Image (cartoon, helix red, strand yellow):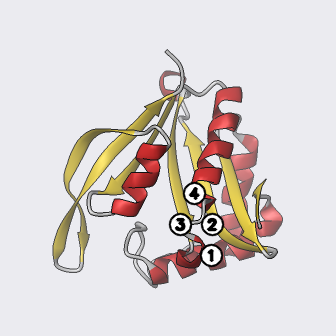
Protein backbone atom coordinates (compact mmCIF):
# COMPACT_ATOMS: atom_id res chain seq x y z
CA UNK A 1 0.00 0.00 0.00
CA UNK A 2 1.39 3.36 -1.06
CA UNK A 3 0.53 6.52 0.86
CA UNK A 4 1.09 9.97 -0.61
CA UNK A 5 1.67 13.00 1.58
CA UNK A 6 3.26 16.40 1.59
CA UNK A 7 6.77 16.23 3.02
CA UNK A 8 7.70 18.32 6.06
CA UNK A 9 11.08 19.35 7.52
CA UNK A 10 11.00 16.34 9.89
CA UNK A 11 11.26 14.15 6.74
CA UNK A 12 14.60 15.67 5.73
CA UNK A 13 16.82 12.78 6.84
CA UNK A 14 14.67 10.18 5.13
CA UNK A 15 14.41 12.27 1.95
CA UNK A 16 18.19 12.71 1.87
CA UNK A 17 18.66 8.94 2.30
CA UNK A 18 16.18 8.32 -0.53
CA UNK A 19 18.00 10.77 -2.80
CA UNK A 20 21.34 9.08 -2.10
CA UNK A 21 19.79 5.67 -2.89
CA UNK A 22 18.38 7.02 -6.16
CA UNK A 23 21.79 8.51 -7.06
CA UNK A 24 23.32 5.06 -6.51
CA UNK A 25 20.75 2.87 -8.27
CA UNK A 26 19.96 4.80 -11.44
CA UNK A 27 21.78 6.89 -14.00
CA UNK A 28 18.56 8.71 -14.88
CA UNK A 29 18.78 11.21 -12.00
CA UNK A 30 20.92 14.32 -12.46
CA UNK A 31 23.51 13.63 -9.77
CA UNK A 32 26.05 10.83 -9.87
CA UNK A 33 26.80 8.65 -6.83
CA UNK A 34 28.77 10.66 -4.26
CA UNK A 35 28.10 13.98 -5.99
CA UNK A 36 25.22 15.13 -3.76
CA UNK A 37 26.62 17.74 -1.38
CA UNK A 38 23.49 18.69 0.56
CA UNK A 39 23.40 17.94 4.25
CA UNK A 40 20.51 17.53 6.63
CA UNK A 41 20.12 21.26 7.34
CA UNK A 42 20.12 22.11 3.63
CA UNK A 43 17.38 19.54 2.97
CA UNK A 44 15.33 20.87 5.90
CA UNK A 45 15.72 24.40 4.50
CA UNK A 46 14.72 23.19 1.03
CA UNK A 47 11.57 21.54 2.40
CA UNK A 48 10.71 24.73 4.31
CA UNK A 49 11.11 26.65 1.04
CA UNK A 50 8.55 24.36 -0.58
CA UNK A 51 6.20 24.91 2.37
CA UNK A 52 6.46 28.72 2.09
CA UNK A 53 5.88 28.88 -1.67
CA UNK A 54 2.27 28.93 -2.81
CA UNK A 55 3.23 27.56 -6.23
CA UNK A 56 5.52 24.69 -5.15
CA UNK A 57 4.96 21.33 -3.48
CA UNK A 58 7.06 18.37 -2.37
CA UNK A 59 5.15 15.07 -2.22
CA UNK A 60 6.45 11.81 -0.80
CA UNK A 61 5.26 8.28 -1.59
CA UNK A 62 5.51 5.94 1.40
CA UNK A 63 5.47 2.15 1.43
CA UNK A 64 5.47 0.40 4.78
CA UNK A 65 6.26 3.69 6.52
CA UNK A 66 9.39 4.39 4.40
CA UNK A 67 9.85 6.81 1.52
CA UNK A 68 9.75 4.93 -1.77
CA UNK A 69 9.72 7.99 -4.00
CA UNK A 70 9.07 11.70 -4.24
CA UNK A 71 7.93 14.39 -6.64
CA UNK A 72 8.97 18.02 -6.37
CA UNK A 73 7.20 20.78 -8.23
CA UNK A 74 8.90 24.15 -8.02
CA UNK A 75 7.01 27.16 -9.31
CA UNK A 76 8.52 30.21 -10.95
CA UNK A 77 9.75 32.99 -8.69
CA UNK A 78 8.82 36.11 -10.67
CA UNK A 79 5.55 37.51 -12.03
CA UNK A 80 6.21 36.38 -15.58
CA UNK A 81 6.75 32.70 -14.71
CA UNK A 82 4.78 32.11 -11.48
CA UNK A 83 2.20 30.18 -13.52
CA UNK A 84 4.84 27.65 -14.55
CA UNK A 85 6.50 24.91 -12.48
CA UNK A 86 9.36 22.47 -13.07
CA UNK A 87 9.06 18.97 -11.72
CA UNK A 88 11.48 16.26 -10.64
CA UNK A 89 10.43 12.73 -9.75
CA UNK A 90 12.40 9.86 -8.29
CA UNK A 91 11.10 6.39 -7.41
CA UNK A 92 13.15 3.49 -6.09
CA UNK A 93 13.39 0.68 -8.65
CA UNK A 94 11.57 -1.83 -6.45
CA UNK A 95 8.50 0.44 -6.48
CA UNK A 96 8.47 1.22 -10.21
CA UNK A 97 5.81 -0.18 -12.50
CA UNK A 98 3.12 -0.50 -9.81
CA UNK A 99 1.42 2.89 -10.18
CA UNK A 100 3.48 5.01 -7.77
CA UNK A 101 4.54 7.45 -10.50
CA UNK A 102 1.03 7.83 -11.88
CA UNK A 103 -0.32 8.40 -8.36
CA UNK A 104 2.32 11.07 -7.66
CA UNK A 105 1.50 12.80 -10.94
CA UNK A 106 -2.25 12.76 -10.23
CA UNK A 107 -1.74 14.15 -6.72
CA UNK A 108 0.58 16.84 -8.05
CA UNK A 109 -1.74 17.80 -10.89
CA UNK A 110 -4.77 18.11 -8.62
CA UNK A 111 -2.75 20.35 -6.31
CA UNK A 112 -1.31 22.37 -9.24
CA UNK A 113 -4.76 23.15 -10.65
CA UNK A 114 -5.91 24.33 -7.22
CA UNK A 115 -2.80 26.49 -6.92
CA UNK A 116 -3.54 28.16 -10.27
CA UNK A 117 -0.58 26.74 -12.16
CA UNK A 118 -0.96 26.62 -15.94
CA UNK A 119 2.25 25.04 -17.21
CA UNK A 120 4.11 22.00 -15.88
CA UNK A 121 7.49 21.11 -17.35
CA UNK A 122 10.29 18.58 -17.00
CA UNK A 123 13.31 17.18 -18.77
CA UNK A 124 13.98 13.50 -19.38
CA UNK A 125 16.84 11.61 -21.02
CA UNK A 126 15.74 10.53 -24.48
CA UNK A 127 16.60 6.86 -23.77
CA UNK A 128 14.58 6.68 -20.51
CA UNK A 129 11.70 4.78 -22.10
CA UNK A 130 9.90 3.94 -18.85
CA UNK A 131 9.78 7.58 -17.76
CA UNK A 132 8.76 8.72 -21.24
CA UNK A 133 5.85 6.27 -21.19
CA UNK A 134 4.72 7.53 -17.78
CA UNK A 135 4.96 11.18 -18.77
CA UNK A 136 3.06 10.61 -22.03
CA UNK A 137 0.38 8.63 -20.15
CA UNK A 138 0.04 11.60 -17.78
CA UNK A 139 -0.47 14.03 -20.68
CA UNK A 140 3.01 15.50 -21.14
CA UNK A 141 4.19 16.28 -24.66
CA UNK A 142 7.69 16.64 -26.07
CA UNK A 143 8.44 20.26 -26.95
CA UNK A 144 12.00 19.80 -28.13
CA UNK A 145 15.34 18.12 -27.69
CA UNK A 146 18.20 19.47 -25.60
CA UNK A 147 21.15 18.09 -27.56
CA UNK A 148 24.23 17.03 -25.60
CA UNK A 149 22.41 18.16 -22.48
CA UNK A 150 24.29 15.82 -20.14
CA UNK A 151 27.54 13.90 -20.09
CA UNK A 152 27.31 10.46 -18.49
CA UNK A 153 30.67 8.77 -18.38
CA UNK A 154 32.15 9.36 -21.80
CA UNK A 155 28.80 9.59 -23.60
CA UNK A 156 26.75 12.64 -24.50
CA UNK A 157 23.08 12.31 -23.62
CA UNK A 158 20.21 14.25 -25.14
CA UNK A 159 17.14 15.19 -23.12
CA UNK A 160 13.59 15.91 -24.17
CA UNK A 161 11.95 19.02 -22.82
CA UNK A 162 8.35 18.08 -22.02
CA UNK A 163 5.35 20.05 -20.80
CA UNK A 164 1.71 19.84 -19.95
CA UNK A 165 -0.66 22.78 -20.16
CA UNK A 166 -3.38 22.64 -17.51
CA UNK A 167 -5.61 25.46 -18.78
CA UNK A 168 -5.89 27.70 -21.82
- In the rendered view, tell whether residue 133 sits above or below residue 25: above
Q: Position of residue 21 (x, y in %)?
A: 56, 81
Q: Are marks 2 and 1 in contact (CB under 8 Å)?
A: yes
Distance from disc 3 to disc 4, alpha carbons, whole Å, reads 8 Å
Q: Position of residue 67 (x, y in %)?
A: 71, 71
Q: Which residue is mark 2?
A: 69
Q: Are marks 1 and 3 in contact (CB under 8 Å)?
A: no
State the SS at label 1.
helix
State the SS at label 2.
strand
Decide which of tag 4 and tag 2 comes sooner along the chain. 2
Of badges 2 and 1, nearer the viewer stands 2
| Crowd around label 4: few <14 · some 14–19 · many ≥20 (10 Å) | many
* Residue 107 visible to an observer of this rendering: yes
* Residue 55 visible to an observer of this rendering: no
Q: Is residue 89 left or right of residue 67?
A: left
| Crowd around label 1: few <14 · some 14–19 · many ≥20 (10 Å) | many
- In the rendered view, tell whether residue 167 sits above or below residue 60: above
Q: Which residue is mark 1?
A: 18
Distance from disc 1 to disc 4, alpha carbons, whole Å, reads 15 Å
On residue 101, the disc is 4
Decide which of tag 1 and tag 4 comes sooner along the chain. 1
On residue 97, the disc is 3
State the SS at label 3.
loop
In front of the other: 163 or 96: 96
The residue that appears at 40% across and 66% down in the rendered structure is 30
- In the rendered view, tell whether residue 49 sits above or below residue 41: above
The residue that appears at 49% across and 27% down in the rendered structure is 81
Q: Is residue 100 left or right of residue 123?
A: right
In front of the other: 66 or 102: 102
Amino acid sequence: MITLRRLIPADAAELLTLQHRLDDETSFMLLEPGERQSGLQQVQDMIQGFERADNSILIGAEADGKLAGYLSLRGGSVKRNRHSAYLVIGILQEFQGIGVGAALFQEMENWAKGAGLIRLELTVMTHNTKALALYAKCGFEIEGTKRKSLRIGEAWVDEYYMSKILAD
